[in-house]
Image (cartoon, rainbow, N blue to C red):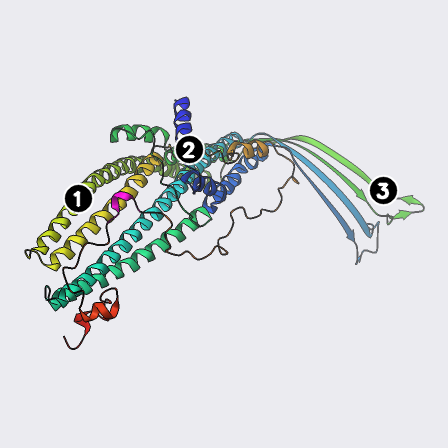
Amino acid sequence: MRGGKFAAGVAFVALLAGPAGAETLREALVRAYATNPQLTGARANLRATDETVPIARSQGLPQVTTQGTVTEQVLNTQTRGVTQAPRIGQAQATASLPLYAGGAVKNGVRAADARVLAGRASLRSTEANVFTLVVAAYNDVLRDEAIVRLNQQNVSVLQVNLRASGDRFQVGDLTRTDVAQSEARLAQAQAQLQQAEANLVTSRENYVEVTGAPAGRLDPPPGLPNLPADPNGAVRVAVANNPALVAAQRASDAAGFDVRVARADRLPQVGAFLTGSYTSFLGSAQSIDGIVLQQDGGQAQAGVRVTMPFYQGGRPAAQIRRAQALEGVAIEQVTQTERAVVSDARSAYAAWQSALRVIQSSEVQITANKLSLEGVRAENSVGTRTILDILDAEQELLNSQVQLVTARRDAYVAGFALLAAMGRAEARDLGLDGGALYDPVANYDRVRGKSWDWSDDPAPKPVAPGTVNTPAQTPAVTRELDPKLQRSANPYTPTDGLDAPDRRRGGDGVTPGVDSPAARPDN
């Protein structure tokens, strides 16, 4: 099973690498793996969870305390007998070792270990979530670049249409209404282009947020491997591998150990102790006739202490009931998480399949719309179609092209989300060997056995870089449009009007919205 996942990861690495010269999806994922603050913060949170294990273990280790006092007598009203020395120094040391704590220490360590395992699974889930965000941001930029290109192309076509309409108006082929319709549709296309450019800027800024660097020229993403053939197969893998479900199961285990810890509070406690003390009168001991009545000295005691609680006001029972209720919460959370995993897997599969069908339909629609546009143009040339019919056909073609690039993005993102739901979208699955992969076990092994009070770590420093110094993103497009989506920007050949005044004056036709016949008061 693991070998199969490794082979799939190696194959996906080859796909992610892509050609040289542009940023690949793999490079974006590697950078996010190293610098995304959500991921680096989750690692720090897991390291904090690791420390709960030595904290729990410390409850079963020896405890040593010391205490020192110096007392100066400032008032003594005694007039008879031997008075206490006016100055006393005392030092005391106590060592204790719990021998039996009703299972509290053992089950506390088990609960901490279970929470560490839950934290590791949560870190895996965070990895998958961050990678899903990167994949979505990467494909959002590709989609919005294509949509900007399509809208630029549409504006160019409509500008030519408007010039051609003005030329034909000059020779009497069209009316001012036809020209006004061309102007209105061009203005609409320009507004759509502005919106598309704004969406591209937003997608690029989101890309900077999740990856830590601006998007340059992005290569198309590779195909996704090992996608399931049916939703039932996706659910089976997801229920077995989804890290969020694993985390919930480990948290439920920890809650069960917490109940045992609470029960230990009403059981006997046995511990050994050793106490030593030393008292010094600091040269102020009292004496009578040269006989020192108070002398410096020390003492030591050792023994075993047994504590048996008989009545604690109902506190132990309340703590047990509370722990049992929290265990019930954790058990129900497992069921809730399982439901969410099943729903996510099925929904992602449905979204992926739906997007694939939309791609097929859009490709057919584009081909049909191109033929329809050519037919409408031909019919317009013989007078059976209006300019509005052509403009509508142009818009329908644009809509189908935008639908295609959107569906391509949706299919890829849904496919990757499906892999994430199945627990197959983490760093080891993707083979992100841009550096050493983060090992969550290394820190656990480092701190688990530590019992020295002065072995703290250096002060933490930021790992993820800020993006305040990255340049503001622009809607400039660096990728060429898919050849299948490119169109000719010269749909008309004017039949006449070469000697029209506007042609002689403007040199390149009617200026939309300014020199068009519909904008002149004499028309």
The amino acid pointed to by label 1 is: Gln
Question: Up-down: is 434 above or below 139?
Answer: above
Q: Is residue 227 left or right of residue 384?
A: right
Q: Is residue 377 left or right of residue 286?
A: left
Q: Label 2 belongs to which residue?
A: 430
Q: Label 3 belongs to which residue?
A: 295
The amino acid pointed to by label 2 is: Leu
Q: Which mark is residue 365?
A: 1
Alpha carbon separation for disc pair 1 and 2: 35 Å
Is any atom of residue 411 visible in this view? Answer: yes
Comparing 411 with 397, the one in front is 397
Specify the farthest residue to the right: 289
The amino acid pointed to by label 3 is: Gln
Mark 2 Cα-neighbour bin, 10 Å: few <14, some 14–19, many ≥20: many
Question: Which element carries disc 3, helix, strand or loop?
Answer: loop
Question: Which element carries disc 2, helix, strand or loop?
Answer: helix
Stretch in magenta: 481-487
Specify the farthest residue to the front: 499
x then y, percent, for residue 272: 64, 30
Mark 1 Cα-neighbour bin, 10 Å: few <14, some 14–19, many ≥20: many
In the rendered image, the quadrant that contains the C terminus is: bottom left
**Is 485 one of the magenta-colored residues?**
yes
Comparing 103 with 28, the one in front is 28
Of discs 1 and 2, which sits in the foreground?
A: 1
Is any atom of residue 332 visible in this view? Answer: no
